[in-house]
Image (cartoon, rainbow, N blue to C red):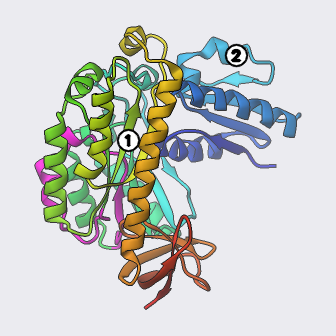
Amino acid sequence: MSAQAITLGCRLNFAESEVLKARAPDGSIIVNSCAVTAEAVRQTRQAIRRARRERPQARIVVTGCAAQLEPDSFRGMPEVDEVLLKDFDRPTVAAGFRQRVRSFVAVQTGCDHRCTFCTIWQARGPSRSLPFEAIREAVACELDGAAAEIVLTGVDITSYEGGLGQLCERLLAALPNLKRLRLSSLDSVEMDEALLALLPEPRLMPHFHLSLQAGDDLILKRMKRRHSRAQAVALVERIKTARPDASIGADLIAGFPTESEEAALNSLRLLDDCDIVAAHVFPFSPRPNTPAARMPQLERELVKARAARLREAAGKRRSAWLDGLIGTTQPVLIENSAKGHTDAFAPIVIAGSGRGDTGPARIMGRTEGALVGVFA
């Protein structure tokens, strides 16, 4: 039996898992862990135990951010055969989901920032950018396979050496068959002028997921974020002016230490002010050895309640966005089993369509979670 990968967390992890799986001996199970929240670490341990129950003879190797931060803890689990730690000095280009319609290609790893709630910089080390030629070759390889869309991913891709905008420009110029280029999470304050100038490019997909985290200036300072609320709103206005069809996603943390009700409401209002239609809401989770863990904490039930309120409001905005697309014609890529996404990353189902089908689709209605359309 070939090696299996169980991946938790971010798109970068998924890309790296493909590389690890290809190198692992047959019969192995690679568990690529996540440490972004305490819940992510709990789910990693749960996945390890489940893997051992389901495949008692497999060799289980644990890697990723949680293993990097707590290697002895994972080595102590009876289900684990090996903990594989990263070599910060030898980053490699990772291309994930080979032979899939959408493929993730890592261009960068690590982070030079020190947000007070985050341990990922400890797990992945300083920011390191991969060479352009290696990235170009990885993208070309994916395109030569089945990939119709490339997603550039990393821990902090806007910190790419030389600028993310220039990287995108060079890739689009070097690879005319790269028809769909998508970006993973972006640090709004690091979006360079070359990238902003590239926004009208039709080959750049019009969905921008921003690492905003909060909508209150005092909380942003205590998080040690490098942007203000006004800067986030101004950036979205600039994106929308340059690319009216763009959709905005965002990461938001609810219940950060010292967060007042007014501060929480400022984050709630940010959904409207930044036209966020794809919010990833995280209840604050204190991580070991971080400044935020030493700040005055909110009651857990209050944190959960604020996260639920933020999710509910975000859900209503997303529903209204999807409803607003009914009756329009949208460019679509079908990824699997008649399911796909519009260019702005609205999920869609087109009956009778096949993997890799692409083109304009008429939006006829929607289910609870996806648009329903027909190819025009």
Q: How far is disc 2 from disc 1 in space, using C-alphas?
A: 32 Å
- Residue corresponding to mark 2: 75
The residue that label 1 is drawn on is: 251
- Say which mark, if any, is on residue 134: none
Determine the residue located farthest toward the top in the rendered image. Answer: 294
Q: Earlier in the sequence, mark 2 or mark 1?
A: 2
Q: Is residue 319 visible?
A: yes
Question: Residue at 63% across / 73% down in the picture?
Answer: 337
Say which residue appears at 20% left-offset and 68% top-offset: 244
Nearest the eye: 338 or 244: 244
| Residue appearing at x 46%, y 61% in the figure | 141
Residue 374 position, x and y percent, is 50, 87
Quadrant including the C terminus: bottom left
Examine the rendered structure and indicate whether residue 162 appears above or below residue 366. Answer: above
Name the side, left or right, on which 98 lies relative to 297: right
Q: For the point 44% across and 10% down, which residue is it?
A: 289
- Give the percent coordinates (x, y) of residue 192: 15, 46
Closest to the observer: 296 or 120? 296
How many numbered markers are drawn?
2
Q: Is residue 191 above or below residue 345?
A: above
Residue range in magenta is 177-206
Residue 207 lies in magenta, yes or no?
A: no
